[in-house]
Image: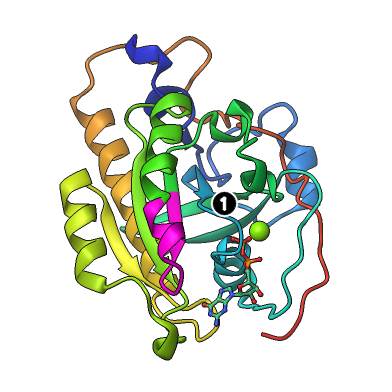
Amino acid sequence: MSPSMSPFNSTAMKRAKTGRGRPIQQGEEKAMARRPDDEYDYLFKVVLIGDSGVGKSNLLSRFTRNEFCLESKSTIGVEFATRTLQVEGRTVKAQIWDTAGQERYRAITSAYYRGALGAILVYDTTKQTTFENVSRWLKELRDHADANIVIMLIGNKTDLKHLRAVATEDAQVFAEKEGLSFVETSALEATNVEKSFQTILSEIYRIISKKSLSSNEPAPSGIKEGKTLVVGPQETNTKKACCSS
Ligand SMILES: Nc1nc2c(ncn2[C@@H]2O[C@H](COP(=O)(O)OP(=O)(O)O)[C@@H](O)[C@H]2O)c(=O)[nH]1
Ligand SMILES: [Mg+2]
């Protein structure tokens, strides 16, 4: 792959903060008027994958809205949620994409993976088959995502201790073998959710910053310092009613 094809060049969005001393760029004024506090250094797209029912949507709602839903409901259409946070001293806007149940039919399209810098691969610690299917999801990533994508393995639902079916060590050994970072979480109890997202965002940041330091290549055409590059639809995030926090 040519360097300009890599998402680390083409879609890691470095956005100059809209501060004094820089002229407002075309189109920016409008965006600022709409969301005056939306300032960030980087925008990272991360996709959630894994079998249906493992808790992807709840990990997302826990991370972005601090909400959890006991009842399971499929959402319509691909959607993402965002949260802006500090990562390694930088303001990062995490744009986390969630499936709309297509994983049930193994029908996730390549558009879902396009421009993703990270993938969070979730299994359910109480369901062995969801762990066995992790290998299939890794293959899916190899086939559809960029080769440099940062992958994190998450074993979710640790609150259901009496139902545990996948040993922590087994997942740890597997993750090490595959070179993935690994965390066990409970979206219900909000255990390690923050930590897992922070970990993958930090990993992405480290790769991006190393890359821009060591790169002697000119920026790919169309990418200029201070410009916002858009990956996927901007703020088409649909508001869903959910339950308690
Ligand atoms: N006990 C428990 N249930 C969870 C947890 N995360 C999700 N669930 C439940 O598992 C079901 C599926 O969750 P959902 O987020 O829709 O999974 P998805 O299909 O992977 O998006 C729902 O009934 C959730 O309430 C968790 O950490 N602990
Ligand atoms: Mg879901």
Residue tagged by mark 1? 96
Q: Is residue 82 above or below residue 1?
A: below
Using the rendered image of the protein, determine whether residue 89 is visible from the camera's viewpoint.
Answer: no
Where, quadrant-wise, is the N terminus in this rendering?
Answer: top left
Horizontal and vertical percent position of residue 140: 46, 34
Neighbour tally class for label 1: few under 14, some 14-19, many 20 plus, Cα within 10 Å: many
Residue type pointed to by label 1: Ile
Q: Residue at x 26, y 45 (%)?
A: 206
Q: Is residue 218 left or right of residue 145?
A: left
Magenta run includes residue 124: yes
Instruction: Tell me the element at label 1.
Output: strand
Q: Position of residue 118 (x, y in %)?
A: 42, 43
- Side (left or right) of 204 relative to 194: left
Q: Which residues are magenta?
A: 120-132
Residue 219 lies, in percent from the top left, at 38, 15
State the colouring used for the structure image: rainbow
